[in-house]
Image: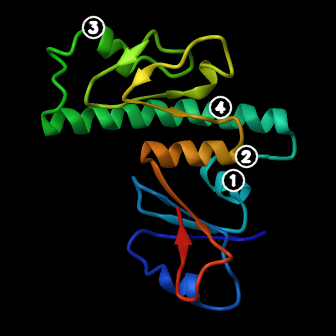
Amino acid sequence: MTHVVIPAGEDITAHLSGGDHAWLIAVTNSSTGDTVLADTVTEVVEHLIDGYDPSDPEAAFEQRLEWAVQTTNLQQGLLAVVAQNEGTLDIDTIGEDALTALFTGRDEAAEVAQWRHEVPLLHVASHYEPYSERPRPEGNVHLIDPYTELTLLLSLHAAGTLEVLYNDEDRDEGEEFAA
């Protein structure tokens, strides 16, 4: 089990085609531009979450959940700031319910059934069906799912926070990774 972190701006191709090591997963952080090349999704999650310990599945889930809450809080704030700077979010006219949904902590479910605003609502999947009895909000919503290491990475990819690519072992010569 190995991984390597390639800082933003560094040429990644030497790490992909050099040597006889074929990385199985490449994950790029959209905020920093850093890319992690790894043999397993566990290694990527270990890189994302300080002190992550996959040896105890219950404790590992708690670590992923806590990290998902923190990351979703941060990412939602960043999305709101960007939308306000771009003119797609006017905090003076969006309404109190929408502001509450955008800026309330992600450690509990949002009191939102539908989200029709241009800025996406990010939240944590564990608060909603099928993990609880609360229906998932509909609309422009991305739920970050810490249930497994893979669901965490794929939900972050779907939300645009990470770019997750897998090495297709059956690829034609010259092809690299596929989403």
Circles 3, 2 touching at the beta carbon (< 8 Å): no
Q: What residue does disc 1 label?
A: 46
Q: Dot 4: few (<14), some (14–19), or many (≥20) neighbours within 10 Å?
A: many
**Amino acid at circle 3:** Glu
Q: Which is nearer the eye, 103 or 118?
A: 118
Q: What residue does disc 4 label?
A: 65
Circles 2, 1 touching at the beta carbon (< 8 Å): yes
Q: Whole-Å distance between the Cαs marked 3 and 2?
A: 37 Å
Q: Dot 1: few (<14), some (14–19), or many (≥20) neighbours within 10 Å?
A: some
Q: Whole-Å distance between the Cαs marked 4 and 2?
A: 11 Å
The answer to whether 161 is drawn above or below residue 97 in the figure is below
Circles 4, 1 touching at the beta carbon (< 8 Å): no
Q: Secondary structure at mark 4?
A: helix
- The tag earlier along the polypeptide, 4 or 3, is 4
**Amino acid at circle 1:** Glu
- From the image, which quarter does the N terminus lie in? bottom right
Q: Secondary structure at mark 2?
A: loop
Looking at the rendered image, the disc whose residue lies closer to the viewer, 1 or 3, is: 3
Task: Give the residue displayed 83% in from the left and 32% down from the top.
Answer: 58
Q: Whole-Å distance between the Cαs marked 1 and 3?
A: 38 Å
Q: What residue does disc 2 label?
A: 52
Measured from the top left, where is residue 137 in percent x and y? 46, 19
Q: What residue does disc 3 label?
A: 96
Measured from the top left, where is residue 126 in percent x and y? 63, 25
